[in-house]
Image: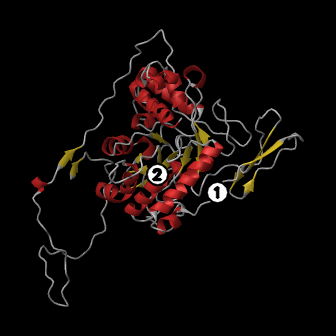
Amino acid sequence: MTQICEHICPLDEDFEEIASSEIIKNDFDPSGVDKKCYAEIINIDTECIETVKKEYLGIKEELIDKYPGETITLDDVRSGKRTLDELIAQLTVEEMARMCVGTLRRNDGSITVADAFTVPGAAGDTSTILKDSRKVDTMIMADGPAGLRLQPHFKTDRNGKILPGGAVFGDLIKPWPKDTPKDAIDYYQYCTAIPIGWALAQSWNTDMVESVGEMIGKEMEQFGVVLWLAPAMNIHRNPLCGRNFEYYSEDPLVAGKIAAAMTRGVQKIKGRGTTIKHFAANNQEDNRYFVNVHIKERALREIYLKGFEIAVKFEIAVKESNPASVMTSYNLLNGIHTANSKDLTQKALRDEWKFEGMVMTDWLTSQDVPGLTGKYGAHYPISASSGCIYAGDDIQMPGCEKNIADIIEAVNSGKEKDGYSITKADLQFCCKNIIKLILRLK
């Protein structure tokens, strides 16, 4: 079967691809030791091949509230009394903007947006803005890739409030403050370390990888984590890439199959999901926020996106994985931040591959943090909050008040914000994807 697809990710500047200097002959000549042999060219009647033309989402239609005198909750949706569209239609622009921005716990115990936090060391969670009014719970996210990355040792006061201190980042452990109560209660949450992605892929053993994923899913259940921010599966384009240890292979088939196996394992456990990342073409660690990766469409589809496509597609016959979520990368792809690329998140991921989960940004993607972005940001702007909603990048992690304000301004004004025009329907679409995943996992 062949597919007719729209073009995606056009080049922002042309370049010459490296090609063989040999002139490939059209005939097959196996004779003679000194003559080079070329693969036989076989002419195929293309009319005999089934062809499918892909359909793409057009302009989104705004959902209108049909029950203005009623407060629809997620319990109503679960019971079948009301639909998810009917709930989404009742939400205000501010509620949806806050739902599309996540949270992060700082070292001092505070968080960027006023939400509760329950798993020390977790990377972040979705907003609680609709928890009381609409019964929409949060999804707690923990980083990977070598198993769950949580804070092994934490303390609470006698009332159960988590106390600052003990946070681990690399080899650095944040000390307990001097005013830590003497009667503080110690808790421990040690997680199992698994081999790095590269080592797992070298096994070529998808059954074993699936069993590893199932073990991680059970630990997620034990500690209250809903989304694991793994597996990571970019192509080993450069041997010096700082993330190669957590990426699987230079071969997209190997990467896709291993990631699919890991996802199947994790998601065997009810209410747990994976987040395949970094989508897409994250090929170097230096200047990750602003490196502009130039890739022609054929190479993009056949190499850099193919592993993600394999991991995303859910077909019983081939037993792939249907991951709960996808995380975009920091880099630009042909001049556009991947988090702002509708070609990636809508056309390829959702329209062509039929992905039905949630898309999130990598951490601080749409926040200007000079300590992280460094001196490289002068040439390109930071990824835009409005651009994430435009592209269908549903939730910006971990989020900040400026992200929320930018979204609200862009929707309410009807004008371009940081180069992108978005509508209430666009915001409803992203918010719906988040809550739909909460329905699936909670």
Q: Is residue 164 above or below residue 295?
A: above
How packed mark 2 is, by other alpha carbons closer than 10 Å (few <14, some 14-19, many 20 or more), is many
Q: CA distance from mark 2 to mark 1?
A: 19 Å
How packed mark 1 is, by other alpha carbons closer than 10 Å (few <14, some 14-19, many 20 or more), is few
Rendering coords of residue 210 (x, y %): 49, 57
N-term-proximal mark, 2 vs 1: 1
* Residue 414 visible (yes or no): no
Residues 106 and 124: in front is 124
Q: Element at badge 1?
A: loop
Q: Is residue 234 above or below residue 35?
A: above
Based on the displayed image, in which of its 4 quarters is residue 170 positioned?
A: bottom right
Q: Which mark is residue 264?
A: 2
Residue in the image at 65% along x and 29% along y: 114
How is the rendered protein coloured?
secondary structure
Q: The disc labelled 1 sits on which kind of residue?
A: Thr
State the residue position of label 1.
192
Q: Identify the image quadrant of the C terminus.
A: top right
Q: Element at badge 2?
A: helix
* Residue 69 visible (yes or no): yes
Rendering coords of residue 258 (x, y %): 45, 59
Would you say 5 lies left or right of 81 here? left
Rendering coords of residue 347 (x, y %): 32, 42
Residue in the image at 47% along x and 43% along y: 324
Q: Which mark is residue 77?
A: none
Residues 292 and 205: in front is 205
Q: The disc labelled 2 sits on which kind of residue?
A: Arg
The mark tally for this picture is: 2
Q: Residue furthest right?
A: 182
Rendering coords of residue 308 (x, y %): 40, 53
